[in-house]
Image (spheres, grey):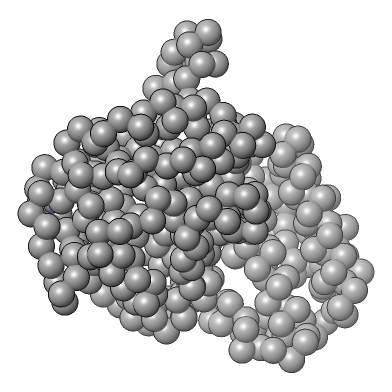
Amino acid sequence: MPFSDFHGNAETVRTLREMLARDHFPHAVILSGPQGAGKFTLAQMVAKTMNCLERPTTDGLPDFCGRCANCTRIAEADALEERFAEAVEARENLREADKRETRILVQTHPDVLIIPPDPPQMLVKVDQVRHVIHEIYYKPVEGRERVYIFSDADFMKEAANSLLKVLEEPPEFATIFLLTDNPSALLPTIRSRCMHLRLAPLSSSEVEQYLAKHRPEWKPRERALVARVCGGGLGRARNFDLAAYLAARQDALTMLVPALRAGDHSDLFRVTDTYRSGADGKAKTEQLIRTLYSLLEDMLFHKSGTAELVRNQDIQPELAHMAEGVDFSWIVSAVQRLGELESGMRRNLLRSLALDTFATSLER
Ligand SMILES: [Zn+2]
């Protein structure tokens, strides 16, 4: 899987490869861009190129073979979500005292370390950065460069200060990647010590073309829907669970429609009754809430005369009809109530009851 497999942002990819060619790669790089733009994929590609044993070139620039021992071991971390889940589970199985001292790290090659945010707060903690400091000054073991990838550079304060110390005196043979969808949240003192490269979201048509190749089982109108719902995030689009989305959307419509037409509630209660407690129920409810947001936003696009921005294009007429029946303030207050529902869910309110309350509170 060489660089030619990376979709979009050709200029940023070229810049990275030119820096690799000059053998003068910056010690710290902020790679920013929306979720699904390929930040992690690209950082992994750089890590492979730095350490590939075959060192091929394509288009006159360094590439990686994807087959050698270094490439394949680094690639084991490509499925980061799986490796992350394994690390979290391994920690869950430790004794209480050890659990507190164990930080989540993903390492499939001795010279490439991935530092994901540590649950439950989902922030990078000081002990994780200390681990980096502890080993970053040792020369690479099996590769040429040590690579540290902070897959979501959202730091606790102490951790950020600790990282700053490394950035002030980085070793020659190491590169740190900070991946973020919000670079302005990083300390200015960190930002000023890093090179900053941005990945732009892909256009809907670019995502559709990509999906035509990778999700051929979807119909063109389904691919168009996924591309719009994912807002240019390729990773998200490729793994999109279309069936779950359509089911959540049907439920969301069943909740919104009686609010507009003040009718019978039996359909509504039948739907909300399927949102139960437990982990499955949690994921299902989160999806429902996200979908409700996107439908309300689409209604807002209709009302403000920007129907071309509507994400759920395939149900345009229905959305237009719904939008006609309400005014701006109804949508604004619905979004506000949805926010309240969302924070109530975090406090573990009874799910189906909270959904009923939300839906009936929207009635005019
Ligand atoms: Zn290789």
Query: Left or right: 357 with respect to 163?
Result: right
Task: Work out which quarter of the rendered image holds the C terminus and state it.
Answer: bottom right
Nearer to the camera, 259 or 39:
39
Nearer to the camera, 111 or 363:
111
Q: Is residue 341 above or below residue 206?
A: above
Q: Is residue 66 visible?
A: yes
Q: Is residue 151 above or below residue 1?
A: above
Nearer to the camera, 241 or 266:
241
Query: Left or right: 245 with respect to 303?
Result: left
Residue 130: percent from left, percent from top: 49, 27
Residue 293: percent from left, percent from top: 69, 64
Residue 113: percent from left, percent from top: 35, 38
Name which residue lies at 82% across and 64% down: 334
Name which residue lies at 78% across and 56% down: 338
The picture quadrant where one finds residue 296 is bottom right
Query: Left or right: 119 with respect to 301?
Result: left
